[in-house]
Image (cartoon, rainbow, N blue to C red):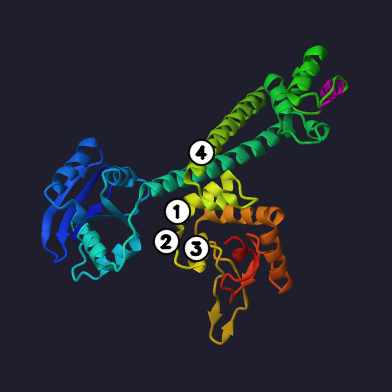
């Protein structure tokens, strides 16, 4: 076999190749992270037997994704290595030398030392895209939450009575439409009654009536809030930002649904799992077969219990580690609640575990220290 090690960087990559006998077939060379660089790599590999080539590179954020896609679509066998494995190989060297050229040989030798290798496929690329979309969605949700909190604080200053008038809260289409056009109480108080009532009726789909519009205008006239021009600008701009984030979330979730549909995963046959949670689980987990046991997947999600032992003391109850994928943990916890509500099989299993003394594991709750994923919410998500 021929082992090709590629050291990934942002702008330039390095590659080399060795045989099964550790003979150097290609000396380390640099190639750029672009069209010309990728085809330079192919030109170096062309003289070698393509069926004997195994290409390895470390998992380094997103910098190697384009190269992995490029090589897979050209039928090369590509293995993405855990940096922990290459770090162990690097430490075994007598001389503590770390350069991009040396690292290519370290990666190639790591490939050679592995008992079994898992090669990336085109399906893995779909998982990567789902993972990126799922994480982007979580970041967008956090941004929208921060914006909504900020908007509430602005409105509390300019029109504190508004939160009591709209029983369903400020964050609804009719309130946003009102505040974008009239962010100050004086603006609402001076608005023509017909226009105000039409604005509320149209954007609430008839939920708010003309009588409510009249009550709102009277409330605005009596408001003790600040008539502050800078705050009015912040209110309108924050609403625009929230609406933009809403549209981004819609587009992201639509694309996630398309990718999940194309994957035809059996996870989507479980009642209670939708495209969003299902997509985040598939994106974070990838190929389920890379986890030989359920417990390893549990650890990857950070849902495994921590262990605390000192001297003769062994803690019987500890908190979950939360050291794995935050996105996967979030999706699994949400999904666990949904499937219990919508799936009789999961509900029966959940009730049986609760009857045995198992506890519902929430993000801040504790789990048995000797648990192996066989009770409570953790096993339910599996």
The percent coordinates of residue 216 (x first, y second) are 83, 24
Helix, strand or loop at label 1? It is loop
Labels 3 and 1: the sequence-earlier one = 1
The percent coordinates of residue 128 (x first, y second) are 42, 47
Q: Give the quadrant of residue 65.
A: top left
193, above or below 184, in the image: above
**Residue 98 visible, this angle:** no
Judging by the rendered image, the residue that carries numbered circle 4 is 258
Q: Is residue 216 magenta?
A: yes
14, above or below 152, in the image: below
Judging by the rendered image, the residue that carries numbered circle 3 is 297
**Residue 290 visible, this angle:** yes
Q: CA distance from mark 4 to mark 3?
A: 25 Å
Helix, strand or loop at label 3? It is helix
Residue drawn at point x = 65 percent, y = 50 percent: 272
The percent coordinates of residue 231 (x first, y second) are 66, 27
Judging by the rendered image, the residue that carries numbered circle 2 is 290
Judging by the rendered image, the residue that carries numbered circle 1 is 286
Residue drawn at point x = 69 percent, y = 19 percent: 181
Helix, strand or loop at label 2? It is helix
Q: CA distance from mark 2 to mark 4?
A: 24 Å
How crowded pointer 2 is (Cα within 10 Å; few <14, some 14-19, many 20+) is rated as few
Indicate the quadrant containing the N terminus: top left, top right, bottom left or bottom right. Answer: bottom left
């Amino acid at each position: 076999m021929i082992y090709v090690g590629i050291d990934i960087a942002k702008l330039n990559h390095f590659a080399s190749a060795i045989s099964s006998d550790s003979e150097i077939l290609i000396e380390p060379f640099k190639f750029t992270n672009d069209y010309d660089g990728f085809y330079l790599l192919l030109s170096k590999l062309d003289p070698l037997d393509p069926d004997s080539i195994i290409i390895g590179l470390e998992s380094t954020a997103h910098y190697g994704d384009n190269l992995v896609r490029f090589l897979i679509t050209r039928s090369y066998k590509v293995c993405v290595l855990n940096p922990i494995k290459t770090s162990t190989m690097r430490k075994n060297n007598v001389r503590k030398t770390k350069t991009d050229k040396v690292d290519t040989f370290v990666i190639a030798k790591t490939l050679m030392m592995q008992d079994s290798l898992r090669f990336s496929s085109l399906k893995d690329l779909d998982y990567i895209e789902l993972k990126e979309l799922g994480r982007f969605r979580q970041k967008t949700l956090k941004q929208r939450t921060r914006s909504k909190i900020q908007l509430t604080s602005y409105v509390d200053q300019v029109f504190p009575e508004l939160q009591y008038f709209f029983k369903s809260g400020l964050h609804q289409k009719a309130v946003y439409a009102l505040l974008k056009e009239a962010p100050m109480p004086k603006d609402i108080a001076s608005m023509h009654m017909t226009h105000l009532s039409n604005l509320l009726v149209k954007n609430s789909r008839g939920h708010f009536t003309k009588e409510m519009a009249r009550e709102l205008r009277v409330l605005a006239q009596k408001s003790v809030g600040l008539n502050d021009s800078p705050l009015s600008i912040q209110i309108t701009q924050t609403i625009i930002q929230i609406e933009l984030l809403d549209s981004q979330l819609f587009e992201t979730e639509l694309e996630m649904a398309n990718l999940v549909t194309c994957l035809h995963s059996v996870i989507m046959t479980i009642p209670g799992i939708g495209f969003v949670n299902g997509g985040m689980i598939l994106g974070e987990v990838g190929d389920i077969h890379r986890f030989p046991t359920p417990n390893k997947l549990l650890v990857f999600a950070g849902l495994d219990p921590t262990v605390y032992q000192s001297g003769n003391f062994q803690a019987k109850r500890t908190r979950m580690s939360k050291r794995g994928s935050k996105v996967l943990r979030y999706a699994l916890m949400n999904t666990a609640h949904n499937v219990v509500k919508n799936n009789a099989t999961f509900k029966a299993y959940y009730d049986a575990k609760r009857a045995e003394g198992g506890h519902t594991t929430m993000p801040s709750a504790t789990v048995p220290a000797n648990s192996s994923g066989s009770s409570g919410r953790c096993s339910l998500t599996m």
